[in-house]
């Protein structure tokens, strides 16, 4: 959808020109977030750029005082965390854990396998008695310094960077504890939000974090909104209940998108039948004979398909099918031919909540971050907590 006249386009946003930002008590929200950095490696190297302490959280005792830039290897040996000084190969011991690496200053950095982070590190022994999990325990605002430029180009307009920041902050608080069965809150990859540590930080996105400090979206019950976002909506976003087997959200509903400038606004994919058979093997229907879309959402995303094979047939959600084939989106037309299957689609990602490329267009057309958020999260309120 092209926007040729911003004055006419702003008629769509009548009622969104003013946003009230309310004060919100901080005690109902956590200022720290725990991010899973490494979840399945047999040994990991850790350390800090300043003097630090290794604490056994199980016994609340100091294991060792460590010097800046000293490296330690941690391993899971039969369910215990073995700690080894890397240079001297001295074994400090084996511990039930968890173990925490705490720098002496708040501005210090910690490292994990050559990648640097703010905050502290927590070391966990996995139940398999072989692998180690490393968690970054970090202040929410410092976490966002890396998340925002990892999720969106830092060169984009400041208002879209602010919108992304508020969405990411809201997502974090809304999903706090999502991965608690693993010992942390969120993953550091696309399963939640991409988090690459200090190497990804940029001045423009750090400014967006600072200028929106504490600002989040809340739902009608004043709970932090799980502010889903994606790359490109392909002309229209969607609602949760259309695509996922999850509780509906009145704040994440189909909205017109303005992502014509996205490199994924239109896309085409072609697979051989043998590739399709390989990717869909786990469905256990045999050799694929046909793929039949059964229903579409109001925004034209495929919600259900029928997969027909030589050994039977099965129904599958469009989003699940998309992930099997690693398609850009579930908004596509499909053509099953004798030797190939062709897809012609639009958009990139699940299509829920804020569209990054659509939000970019709005920012470039002089819309403010609060107007952008009001468009993609209809009915949600912006609030700012205070001490």
Image (cartoon, helix red, strand yellow):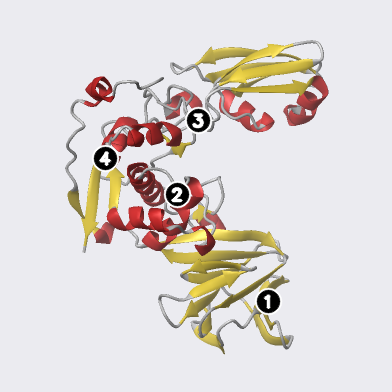
**Dot 4 or dot 3, earlier in sequence:** 3
Quarter assignment of residue 123: bottom right
Above or below for 86 versus 216: below
Circle 1 packing at 10 Å, graded few (<14), some (14-19), many (20+), is many
> Residue at position x 56%, y 24% from top?
330
| Quarter of the image where the N terminus is located | top left
Q: What distance separates the C-alpha of mark 4 from that of mark 2?
A: 19 Å
Q: Which mark is residue 73?
A: 1
Secondary element under disc 2, as helix, strand or loop, is loop
Quarter assignment of residue 307: top right
> Residue at position x 67%, y 74% from top?
80
Picture coordinates of residue 138, whole percent (x, y): 44, 65
Mark 3 = which residue? 262
Nearer the observer, 57 or 209 = 209
Secondary element under disc 3, as helix, strand or loop, is loop
Secondary element under disc 4, as helix, strand or loop, is helix
**CB within 8 Å, label 4 to label 2:** no
């Amino acid at each position: 959808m092209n926007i040729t006249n911003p004055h006419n386009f702003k008629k769509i946003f009548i009622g969104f020109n003013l946003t009230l930002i309310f004060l919100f008590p901080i005690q109902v929200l956590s200022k720290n977030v725990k991010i899973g950095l490494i979840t399945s490696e047999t040994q990991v190297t850790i350390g800090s750029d300043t003097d630090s302490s290794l604490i056994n959280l199980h016994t609340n005792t100091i294991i060792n005082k460590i010097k800046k830039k000293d490296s330690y290897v941690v391993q899971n040996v039969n369910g215990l965390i073995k700690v080894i000084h890397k240079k001297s190969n001295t074994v400090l011991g084996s511990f039930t854990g968890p173990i925490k690496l705490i720098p002496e200053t708040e501005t210090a950095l910690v490292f994990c396998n050559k990648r640097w982070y703010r905050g502290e590190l927590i070391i966990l022994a996995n139940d398999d008695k072989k692998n180690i999990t490393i968690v970054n325990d970090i202040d929410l605002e410092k976490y966002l310094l890396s998340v925002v430029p990892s999720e969106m180009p830092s060169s984009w307009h400041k208002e879209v960077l602010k919108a992304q920041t508020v969405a990411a902050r809201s997502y974090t608080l809304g999903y706090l504890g999502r991965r608690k069965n693993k010992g942390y809150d969120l993953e550091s990859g696309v399963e939640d939000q991409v988090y690459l540590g200090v190497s990804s930080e940029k001045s423009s996105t750090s400014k967006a974090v600072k200028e929106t400090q504490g600002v989040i979206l809340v739902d009608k019950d004043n709970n932090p909104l799980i502010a889903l976002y994606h790359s490109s909506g392909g002309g229209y976003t969607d609602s949760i209940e259309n695509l996922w087997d999850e509780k509906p959200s009145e704040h994440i509903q189909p909205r017109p998108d303005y992502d014509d400038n996205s490199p994924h606004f239109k896309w085409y994919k072609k697979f051989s039948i043998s590739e399709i058979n390989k990717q869909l093997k786990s469905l256990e229907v045999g050799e694929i004979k046909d793929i039949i879309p059964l229903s579409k959402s109001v925004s034209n995303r495929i919600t259900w398909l029928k997969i027909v094979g030589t050994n039977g047939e099965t129904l599958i959600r469009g989003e699940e099918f998309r992930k099997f084939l690693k398609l850009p989106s579930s908004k596509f037309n499909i053509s099953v031919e004798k030797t190939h299957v062709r897809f012609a689609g639009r958009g990139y990602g699940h299509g829920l909540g804020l569209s990054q490329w659509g939000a970019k267009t709005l920012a470039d057309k002089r819309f403010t971050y609060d107007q952008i958020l009001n468009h993609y999260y209809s009915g949600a309120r912006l609030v700012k907590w205070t001490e």
